[in-house]
Amino acid sequence: MIIKSVENFGFWTTQQIENVGRIFIFLFTGLFHIFTFPLQIFKIIEHTWFIGTKSMVVIMLTGIFTGMVLGLQGYYTLIKFGSEGMLGSAVALTLIRELGPVLTAIMITARAGSAMAAEIGVMRISEQIDALETMNINPVRFIFSPRIVASIISFPLLTALFDVVGVVGGYVTGSLMLGINGGIYIYRVNESVVMADITGGFLKSLVFAIVVTTVCCSQGYFTHLQTRGGFGAKGVSFSTTTAVVNSCVMILVFDYVITYLLL
Amino acid sequence: MKKGMVEFYVGIFMIIGIVCSSYLIIELGGVRVINTNDYRLYAYFSSVAGLKKGAGVEMAGVEIGNVVSITLDTEKLLAKVELGIHENIKLAEDVMASVKTSGVIGDRYINLSPGGSETMLESGETIFNTESAIDIESLVSKYIFEKEEKKK
Amino acid sequence: MKSPLIEFIDVKKSFGSNHVMQGVNLSIYEDETTVVIGKSGSGKSVLLKHIIGLMHHDSGKVLFKGEEISSMPRKKREEFKLNFSYMFQENALFDSMNIYENIALPLTETSRFSKQEIRKKVEMRMEQLEIQGTSNKYPAQLSGGMKKRVALARALITEPSIVLFDEPTTGLDPVRKNGVHAMIKSYQQMFGFTAVIVSHEIPDIFQIAQRVAMIEKGKIIFQGSAEEIMKSDLNEVSNFINGIGDFMEY
Ligand SMILES: Nc1ncnc2c1ncn2[C@@H]1O[C@H](COP(=O)(O)OP(=O)(O)OP(=O)(O)O)[C@@H](O)[C@H]1O
Ligand SMILES: [Mg+2]
């Protein structure tokens, strides 16, 4: 009984270590092949369209409502201290340091990350990845490299969009609805945010880009190796779910680690 | 989806994204321009917790300069703050620099209270009268303990 | 005696408790068409995948020109792959690309041909296989037989010297099927390529086969010329060719 469970645990551990190794090799192969000729410019544009352009609307929607709710919550918290004038600074700092990068990454995971995992998973089970290999086309280069470049372009830009729209959202509740002087709001936003906050936010979004794309693409790519979902459509659905869940967890973990290192 | 259209929409996305990024970087993050005509003063504090590079230097509530840099003086083990003060403002030798907070959760800034001396500080000199960031914890405990002592 | 181009020596392969190959010995010669037959699930596709390196055997040897395929250095392996084409049983077309892009992919990714040259080659191939006019469609919009022909076009577009066909004609009407067979044959006469064909088209396929191998219960139970297999006195072989099995009466 005990021996059995120890055995199982050991087996499980070695498997997890193997997974980690596999994902890192996948990541480094992908990063390396970004720079091998011929550069895959058109595919990068196509994926940027999918990851970036098509996420704009949802990012603006989440951004404006996040900003608005921050304005509302912040106002009722700050008014207790009589410093509702600080609302601009509270909204802007929360957005730029934390919520902007994190929520953007989570929204992109939901929109594009799941699609990546599912699409690549289907390519795996219908032997399209094997077909690439027989044609002497490196599948990691073909599938993963353009996507990671597109993510590295899209994540920071979408985060910036989220931040700006969010600050506007805070202005809408704070100033237009709750009657804080608009000038003071803008002044506080301008005054409290420093360059380190902005670069920190961008750094986070870059890290999230790499984390999310790697997790989602590798889950799809290695669909055939997972044991729980089985093969076929069930396996793809399992990989997709795992990809989204793992990405979100990793986003929050990395967010904490980066914040800790930056402070 | 025509190929030309993809490029067009990606172009729009890039432009909007870059405009937003530039707004953040230039407008919000823009390091407060440090005037080259400013002259420099130094001040040592036992604690500048919460103070940031670029924070304002005020006198009587009017901004008269910025914090240029914050370093640790390894000999004295004190925080060494470099202040850039507008050139047309002359400060007396016994001016007092203190780290203050605006509002309850607000940013830290440096407040200068005018001194009475006739001699003025020259660029590169050091302000001797300083007061460190107020540590709310120690304030509170001081308040409590003083009360207890009085009771005795 | 010619030395074989591809040689299986006592190859074993299992998936868990499913022992698909239990000591396969098979020789494939250059410039010949070798046809592999056998019951469904007997391991024909697995055998082909071992040649191109998509699967790795547990024991034994798979040799290409006398060299173990799975332990080739990378450089050599790439050269080796450039000579090969593989046509998948399930086609494995890229469903997010249209038909034109699918067929052109091996050229656009790995060759130095100009756009016009590629277009010319692809159009020629599409015409040959009677799939003109489908360029802008996606694989999901085609019929099974059309997909098969697209897969065939993609396999032949690079003009490879060795082609592995996994059931190239399953799902085609008799006219197209004979067309494909004729095409493979005329190609072989023109360019002299080596073909390995897994097929259930018995006896039609024998007309283009120089060699036939039959796989059964994890072993090659017969290999020889087409005439020889027709005359074979092995029970399993003749029963299989003539479609005799021990069916239950309903
Ligand atoms: N990836 C795999 N994992 C586990 N088992 C497999 C795998 N691929 C094939 N098999 C097993 O190997 C055996 C042979 O399969 P294979 O696909 O080679 O059959 P086949 O001879 O090509 O049949 P058909 O004529 O129907 O295509 C089958 O029992 C199958 O279950
Ligand atoms: Mg098969």
Image (tube, coloured by chain):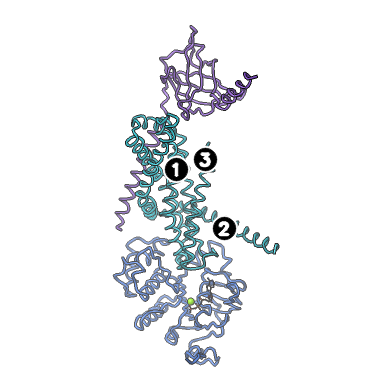
Chain colours: A cyan, B purple, C blue
Q: In this picture, is C29 found above or below A61?
A: below
Nearer to the camera, B85 or A81: A81
* Quadrant containing the C terminus of chain B in the rendered view: top right
Residue picked out by circle 1: A99
Same chain? Circles 1 and 3: yes
Instruction: Please identify the quarter of the rendering in which residue C235 is found.
Output: bottom right
Q: Amino acid at mark 3?
A: Thr
Residue lying at the far front of the rendered structure: B151
Q: How would you rate the neighbour count of disc 1 (Cα within 10 Å): few for under 14, some for 14-19, many for 20 or more?
A: many
Residue picked out by circle 3: A259
**Chain at tag 1:** A
Helix, strand or loop under label 2: helix
**Chain at tag 2:** A
* Quadrant containing the N terminus of chain B in the rendered view: bottom left
Q: Residue A19 has which mark? A: 2
- The percent position of residue C143, horizontal first and vertical second, equals 35, 74
Q: Amino acid at mark 2?
A: Asn
Nearer the observer, disc 2 or disc 3? 3
Helix, strand or loop under label 1: helix
